[in-house]
Amino acid sequence: MKADVSEIAVALAKHGCVLVGEFKLTSGLTSPYYIDLRTMPSYPGLFKLVTDAYISALGDLGISFDRIAGVATAGIPIATLVAYKLGKPFLYVRGGARAHGTQRSIEGVAKAGDSVLIIDDIATTGGNLQLAIKDLRDRGAKVEHAMVLVDREQGAIKKLAEMRVRLFSIMTSSRLLEELRSKGIISSDEYEKVISYIRGELIVRKIRDGTVIDHIPFGQALNVLRILKIKGEEGNRVAMAMNVESKKLGKKDVVKVEGHELQPREVDRIALIAPEATINTIRDYRVEKKMKVRTPDKIEGILRCINPNCISNKQREPITSSFKVLSRTPLLLACGYCETRISHDEVLAQFAS
């Protein structure tokens, strides 16, 4: 029997697991809706309804597996009950390896060659699921399938497909919100705002003063925030759209930062990882200035050489670091003193530190 998505959506909203409004995420970004399934086990009726939906969906798919792995934290209680009901061995993947004891990242038995189904609550970009897949495969397990209750439609399916894993969901965020709108739980305006966010369109109201960074290569928005040292603690309103359709790039990311105008040094940093980006300076809701970034031929005083023996790293030598740009795509630099080469990933590592 297929899961009743409408019944689940209404129950989630009734118990405060789905909220619409404006929410600040841990990254400092804003979202017009929030799904929190960590409280779900506190409501036995809802918990049964949701876990039965997993079991029903698995039966309809007809996939076979030896064990079920939950992903910390909200995925663990769901996977536990599903595994118990199906009579399957259960294990779980931690958010990271323990710093003491066995220092394991996986608790439970996973034998080499076992087929493991991964269960989690929500999939956004798929990052946690990817880490779980890697940990399990490092143990010798076979991982070909994963299942979540809600797919937030922000790239998880594609990311897992790149690892040869099929991601199944009971519902998408779009379907969840559609059900809530049809039942009058959220308004049409609230629905349209969230759907626009999901589709990567304008996700927050216009900023009065600040910066809009457009035409960022797909997947680089978070790195732009790292370059700008934005951690969500500065008090600025920050919004990000990923996987937006773009005639120029095919897919692009967009970042908005309220109350912050970029300095030339920050623009040079962004140019290193987003050479096609455009910077829009906003004042009193208007685009006061628009410029396209340009990766300079020489980078000075922004990066440090990764060669510890380079003269630019000697404290007794007050020398400004200097790098020649050998390639813009992919980024490749060479130290102007010792000729040590530095890659795109090494540049990002310095900006993130």
Image (cartoon, grey):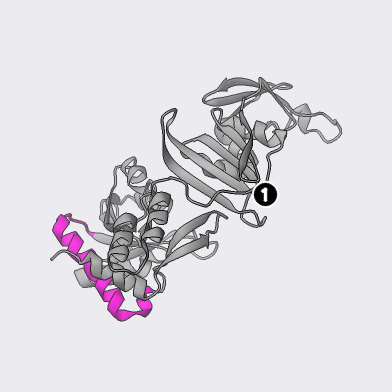
Where is residue 2 shown, x and y percent of the image? 16, 63
Q: Answer few, some or many: residues within 10 Å of disc 1's Cα (few below 14, many 20 plus, some between 14 and 19).
A: some
In terms of image quadrants, where is residue 128? bottom left
Residue 95 visible = no
Taking the image as shown, residue 231 lies to the left or right of residue 1, namely: right
Q: Could you tell me which residue is drawn at 61 percent across and 55 percent down?
A: 232
Callout 1 secondary element: loop
- Check disc 1 and give the amino acid type: Gly
Q: Is residue 316 left or right of residue 88?
A: right
Task: Please tell me whether residue 45 is drawn above or below residue 307 in the rendered image.
Answer: below
- The image quadrant where one finds the C terminus is top right
Q: Is residue 225 above or below residue 269?
A: below
The image position of residue 27, as x and y in percent, is 55, 54
Tag 1 residue:
259
Q: Is residue 345 above or below residue 234?
A: above
Left or right: 322 as drawn, with respect to 20: right
Does residue 43 belong to the magenta stretch? yes
Span colored in magenta: 40-66
The N terminus: image quadrant: bottom left
Q: Determine the residue positioned at 15% across, 61% down.
A: 59
The foreground one among 248 and 28 is 248
